[in-house]
Amino acid sequence: MTPPNPDARTEHSDQDGPSRVGPYRVVDTLDVLDHAEDARRRLARDDRTGRVVVLTLPHASLAEDPGYAVRFRAEAENSRRLSGRWTAPVLDVAPAGADLPWIAHDCAPALTLPAALAAHGGPLPESTVRALGAALAECLAEAHANGLVHAGISPGSVLLTLDGPRLTGYGLARAVSLDAGRRAGVLHGAVSSTLPPGRPAGAPLRPQDDLYALGAVLVHAATGRIDADPDALPDGLRAPIAACLSADPAERPEPRTLAHEFATSGTALPESVRATLAAQAARHPVMVPLAPPTDPEPVGERSRPSRRAVTLGALTGAAGLALGAAGAGAARAFTDGPRRSRPVPRVRGTAPAPLWQLTVDEALVRPPLISRGSVALLMSKKVLSAVHLRDGKQLWSRDDLLPTGDLTLFDGGLFLMLSGTEFSVVSVRTGKVVWTERRYDGSEGRPLFAAVWGAEGHTLWFLAGRITDGGKEEEPVVVAYDVARRRELWRTPVPLTGGTAFAGQGVLHGGALLVPMGTRRLSEGPWSYLALDARSGRKLWRRSYQSVSSDANNIRMTAPGDLLISYDQNAMQAHDLSSGERRWRFTTEGSLYTAPVVHGRTLFFTDENSDTHAVDTRRGEQRWRHGPAFTSTEPMQYSETALSHTGRMVFQRNGSEVDAFDAADGSPRWRFAPVGSGQQAGGLSGYVTSAPGMAVVVNGGALYALPVD
């Protein structure tokens, strides 16, 4: 008979929780009686290795909630991305089929902060609180720099060890979502006690909320209470902790500033806490199971130990050992200030650490525009600016340039900016306007600028309307304009029977400008193109594409192999551009609301279910498909697809995070959930743009440059 999978079993013993969780046997509790907390924390032994770990389990009131179990496990998996010396290392996370979610940390022996206060008999010394504040602030600085809001700092998530404090509990407040508090008053009190007052239930958690939680935890460490008035704090702690607890999030300090302010010297871990940790180590020493002998023991050699587990270190000497070697480690951890952190091995699925992070005053309204692989142009509602991609440093910023549409790049480090019926050419490096064109304003019989249709080298192609002196709109024209010499090259009337409804949908393809031919009623007839020679404006051919809707809102694009790719509802089609013949048709379960991308002979796109597809453009056959890394409770219609600069990696930006896949086979590479203004709870509102060697992720007003390729 095949034995059950130990990773999927959970043996329940009594009302205090299970006695066995996956491969771990619970040996002790770290919780303090009558202390409200957000989760249960236990010491457990891995019978496979003899190692003692700290287990975090759901609060008893949520143990049977399947929705919470999914959120708990998702947050636990994401916690693997945390790094740094004061973050508890993640050993293991409950598998997807486990009855009870859990996470195992390698930081035993350990005491939760309430247990440490109980061992000490009251509030901790000021030096201990300062050391604790410096370590936790450093944790937050690293988390925020890597695009993570911790959302789980509480007295129980802070562990004191003989080698310094360790932070656990990542995402517990997000997993609870606070709606569970209506079913469990104790849990609601534990979670809400470290959140800013007046915060609406279920509102987004921001980096500033982590600072408030840190202040509440330090109040508890210094006073024994979590709701104490900052005036009750010692003089040396009052100002920095009060700043963390400010009602105005903007008044709360930056984590690195706080870590510097809390920097201290002197042995900070009280002797009473060290002794309690040593006693815990003596009760639960590391056990090494011996492997069964493989060969008979030769005569004359020493006999082997018995096959029972061997205790490392005599029990009688464990306390002295812990207080000696480990105690010296604690002194170093709390006394000597910052140490060089050990290299953290890259965990599969962990997003790379950002090369730099930048916060701008307002959320961007367009994706960053990358000029020559070295400069990113950033546009918000009120400011146009440029940053250097090497280090994220700002080159210039202007609040007197207010574009009314997308920016367009040209050779020579120039870009075009629209402002009403005017367009200006601006220097990428300096932000200075080189010149402004005002001759396409529709006055005195001149054409009225409508939309950019293409740009290459120094040539701009745009659509313009023709207005008679009586105000009647005549046949539009396509204009080719040389921005280097500031002169019109040619103009060609085009029979856009739908007026300028298709502005911006012209396409440059193979030396031709493809002009969409609309119908008088957008729902009538198939889609058609008029091809103009890009150099002369001469009309080359006109083709219609049966089954391609003329709806102006549908998505169409060209692809290598002389293809027109169109997507209508949940059907993607490829037509031969020259002949109009359909090559193939590909259907999906979800509709497409955002544009696909093409690399070589592969088309990548993400549908409304956040399923990312790779399709062979020659035959319309699916190469791979990958669903989202999590189940969202929010609509995900507008998931977007992007490619790295080399095309080796595919990015899916959905409503919660950025997922990266290998472009060759669709295998997941990593997940990145950035913080930033405008985010939803665990959410993302922004863009992904590629540049050589990096992906620039935007969430509201926060930018992260992630190394890729």
Image (cartoon, helix red, strand yellow):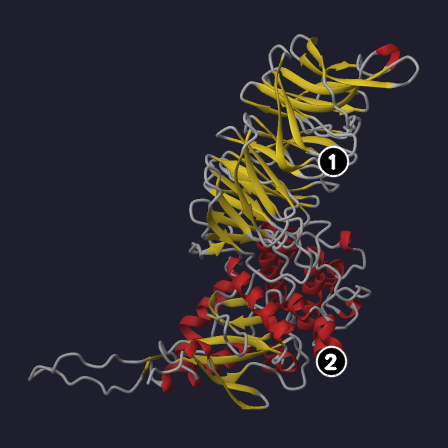
Residue type pointed to by label 1 = Glu
Q: Quadrant of the N terminus?
A: bottom left
Q: Is residue 7 left or right of residue 374?
A: left
Give the quadrant of residue 368.
Answer: top right
Residue type pointed to by label 2 = Arg
User: Does 544 sit above or below residue 696?
Assistant: above
Q: Secondary structure at mark 2?
A: loop
Give the quadrant of residue 475.
Answer: top right
Residue occupying the point 64% across, 86% down: 33
Residue at the limit of the structure toward the left, as seen here: 299
| Residue 225 shows in the view | no
Residue at the limit of the structure toward the right, as seen here: 470
| Residue 671 shows in the view | yes
The percent coordinates of residue 212 (x first, y second) are 72, 62
The percent coordinates of residue 496 (x first, y second) are 74, 23
Judged by depth in the image, the label closer to the viewer, 2 or 1, is 1
**Residue 524 numbered mark, or none:** 1
Q: Which residue is mark 2?
A: 183
Q: Mark 2 packing: few (<14 Cα in 10 Å), some, or many (20+)?
A: few
Between the residue at mark 2 and the residue at mark 1, the CA separation in whole angstroms equals 56 Å
The percent coordinates of residue 309 (x first, y second) are 31, 84
The percent coordinates of residue 277 (x first, y second) are 50, 78
Q: In this view of the protein, which residue sits in the foreground, 325 or 505?
A: 505
User: Does 255 sit above or below residue 491?
Assistant: below
Sequence order check, earlier mark of 2 and 1: 2
Q: In this view of the protein, which residue sits in the foreground, 313 or 236?
A: 313
Q: Secondary structure at mark 1?
A: loop
Circles 2 and 1, Cβ within 8 Å, touching? The answer is no
- Total marks placed: 2
Q: Quadrant of the C terminus?
A: top left
